[in-house]
Image (tube, coloured by chain):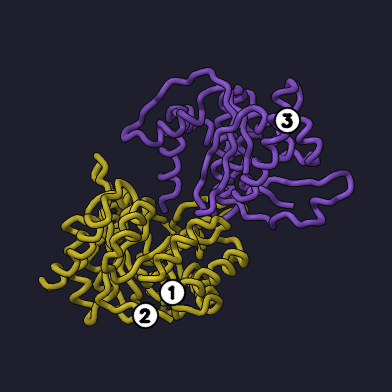
Chain colours: A yellow, B purple
Amino acid sequence: MKTISREAIGLGLRIPYYRHLFEAWPKVDFFEIISENFMGDAPLPKRNLEKVLSRYPVVLHGVSLGIASAAPLDEAYLRRLKELADFTDAPYFTDHFCWTTAHDVQHHDLLPFPYTEENARYVAERAARVQDFIGRPFGLENLSSYVAFASSEMTEWEFNNRVLELSGCHYMLDLNNIYVSSVNHLFDAEAYVDSIRWDRVLQCHLAGHHRNPDGTLLDTHDAPVCDAVWELYRRAWRRSGGGFPTLLEWDENIPPFPEAHAEALSARQHRSRV
Amino acid sequence: MRWRRASKPTCFRAHALTYPVFNRLASAYLTRHPSRAPYLDALGDRLPDFVRADTRWNDPRTAQIARLDQAFNRAFHAPAAPPPRTETLAAAGGPRLRLQPHVTVLEEDWNLMTRRGLCLDAEEDFVPRFVKRKGYWVVYRNVEGGVAPQRLDRVRFRLLGALSEGEALEAACARAAEGLAPPALDRLAKQLPRWFAEWTTLGWFTQ
């Protein structure tokens, strides 16, 4: 299985990058792909992925698993995911703390749910099964969310830690999501970061977001990382002890590859200030 | 998750339906045909039938736009079927050649294909005019895996259209020849082997 160092800095692989990558082959520590974009029958994404794999390690980031959905886990989906994980030899794979499916309808969105002990046990049992089936470390990403539930019995970070404790799975820690949700739900982002068990963190996400006129934030991945998120990053890096692979997501208004990569690499400067 | 964000402006720009119209159509369609799969490859597959069946959208132009969109989607995503075998060509009732699932033959009554290219190439949202103009196209997946539209003349459209409907090779050639005067028939007889050789090289046929 390929490995990615704790100091590694990567980018979410997006189509507009291909031309530059396949001509210049810049030095990049690793790429993260959206798993579902490479799980279909279309040959072109696979061909491009093969080219990328010839030079770079790749990790998988899924959006449709629905670990908290009430529906049973989709076995056909898991088989395809395992094929992709084996094909890429990904050192780990990730998805989100969310539900996506209800009454046989796939919503293609990352939907939140109440943070209760019952749900923690439910999610943990499913996550452990997924990790076991794929045969690689499985990381779950904390959501950016826009609603909270009166029935929640614990904070989001307490819930996430509980799931990881019960399941033996890992964290895909998104610092931009922590910041976005902390503004939207008025919680302490630093307390969230301070709660993290760093030995469970596979990777960290950074991204930009959009500020609405009413002051709430939307996780849009369409801008550079803001100062407040970099501040959280420095705090995370300091508290982690040994660091963690860092990845920049950029999904709208995507700049040319060198610009996006430079933004990702600026993480090094922030580390040096810790 | 960014798929919906990415696909919506693409549809809008490709067809210039305007956002309100596109949103109404998309909402109605997804209410009737919600996604059942973790992937979006086949999400729009029923759109042409939906447009035809629903009086709110049932105008020929929207139906043709939906069909064009489906053709591009299939050309990109459809699995490849096995190439033709000798026994298929020698089947009872005459040899048969079917088109690969990624190959779609289209007839348009407006400049839809041209407009699609113009809209997608434009830097900003750009709405060129609809021009009433007959056109024939085949949309397929090229050897690199990309989507390639190719303009057809009326004879080739009729021939490929007949094959896509499952007609035997002889009947498809007869349909292509309908109404042609003798000099054109002679030309067609000479062109047919070259066309089939080209289409075979492009990988359009299955058994």
* Secondary structure beneath label 2: loop
* Tag of residue A3: 2
Q: Nearer the viewer, residue A258 or A24?
A: A24
Q: Quadrant of residue A234?
A: bottom left
Q: Quadrant of residue A203?
A: bottom left
- Residue B156 is left or right of residue A213, and the answer is right
Of all chains, the one bearing label 2 is A
Looking at the rendered structure, the kind of residue marked 1 is: Ala
User: Percent position (x, y) of residue A81?
Assistant: 53, 68
* Secondary structure beneath label 3: helix
B164, above or below B175, in the image? below
* Secondary structure beneath label 1: loop
User: Percent position (x, y) of residue B86?
Assistant: 78, 56
Residue position marked by numbered label 1 in the rendering: A90
Q: CA distance from mark 1 to mark 2?
A: 8 Å
**Circle 2 Cα neighbour tier, 10 Å, few/some/many (<14 / 14–19 / ≥20):** few
Of all chains, the one bearing label 1 is A
Q: Residue at x 80, y 41 (%)?
A: B168
**Circle 3 Cα neighbour tier, 10 Å, few/some/many (<14 / 14–19 / ≥20):** many
Q: Residue at x 25, y 50 (%)?
A: A223
**Circle 1 Cα neighbour tier, 10 Å, few/some/many (<14 / 14–19 / ≥20):** many
Residue position marked by numbered label 3 in the rendering: B176
Quadrant location of the C terminus of chain A in the rendered image: bottom left
Looking at the rendered structure, the kind of residue marked 2 is: Thr
In this rendering, do the residues under marks 1 and 2 share a single chain? yes
Q: CA distance from mark 3 to mark 1?
A: 52 Å
